[in-house]
Image: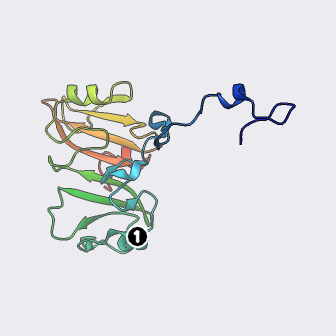
């Protein structure tokens, strides 16, 4: 409604104010750069789990969440506190899930087709791993392979999970595993 002056007539000066709305619909502005990164569970491999499995799940929760071919425990002896589960129908060397005291604590990978959280695969050079995970690597000598190393990577996805690459004597990744400490640091798996 136009503004009126003291006489009750419309004021042309006030009617001439610019209209502050666009003539057509304009989508709202977004601030994508200010949004937090997507959740860590966006992929199959993470330091906090693998696919639908989350570190800390019970054996029953792991079986219920898996949804794929049955997980085989390879006939674990009664009373065993630490053991591995293997996806049925796969080579045990591809991926194996470690459970200790009834909880999922780590998974191991030897499949060159499986990329580790944050990057790196079986067959990559240690230098490539160091470049991918610069500033987050602790290096130590391999316990059994002369000239080999362990490259321990922390804070891959901002969480408490840890990623460990095993390097052979030629400085190439022979396998990697991810999970929680201290189990992720067991050099002999459950042995």
Q: Is residue 48 in view from this perspective?
A: no
Q: Is residue 187 in view from this perspective?
A: yes
Give coordinates of residue 75: x percent, y percent. 26, 74
Residue 12: quadrant of the picture: top right
Give coordinates of residue 146: x percent, y percent. 18, 31
In the displayed structure, does residue 57 sit left or right of residue 18?
Answer: left
Residue 8: quadrant of the picture: top right
Q: Nearer the viewer, residue 72 or 78?
A: 72
Give coordinates of residue 99: x percent, y percent. 38, 62
In the displayed structure, does residue 68 sit left or right of residue 82?
Answer: left
Q: Nearer the viewer, residue 153 or 15?
A: 15
Q: Nearer the viewer, residue 125 or 170?
A: 125
**Quarter of the figure that contains the C terminus:** bottom left
Q: Which residue is at the far right? A: 6
Q: For the point 16% across and 50% down, which residue is it?
A: 111
Q: Which residue is mark 1?
A: 59
**Quarter of the figure that contains the N terminus:** top right
**Number of marks:** 1
Residue 80: quadrant of the picture: bottom left
Q: For the point 42% across and 70% down, which residue is it?
A: 61
């Amino acid at each position: 409604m136009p503004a009126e002056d003291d006489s009750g007539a419309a004021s042309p000066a006030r009617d001439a104010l610019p209209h502050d709305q666009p003539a057509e619909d304009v989508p709202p502005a977004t601030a994508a750069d200010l949004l937090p990164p997507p959740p860590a569970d966006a992929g199959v491999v993470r330091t906090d789990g693998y696919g639908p499995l989350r570190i800390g799940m019970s054996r029953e929760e792991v079986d219920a969440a898996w949804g794929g071919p049955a997980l085989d425990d390879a006939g674990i002896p009664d009373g065993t506190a630490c053991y591995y589960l293997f996806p049925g129908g796969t080579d045990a060397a591809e991926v194996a899930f470690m459970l200790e005291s009834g909880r999922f604590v780590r998974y191991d990978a030897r499949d060159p087709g499986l990329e580790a959280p944050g990057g790196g695969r079986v067959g990559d050079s240690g230098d490539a791993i160091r470049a991918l995970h610069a500033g987050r690597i602790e290096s130590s000598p391999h316990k059994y392979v002369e000239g080999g190393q362990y490259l321990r990577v922390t804070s891959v996805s901002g969480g408490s999970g840890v990623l460990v690459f095993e390097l052979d004597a030629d400085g190439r990744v022979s396998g990697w595993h991810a999970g929680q400490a201290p189990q992720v640091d067991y050099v002999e798996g459950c042995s």
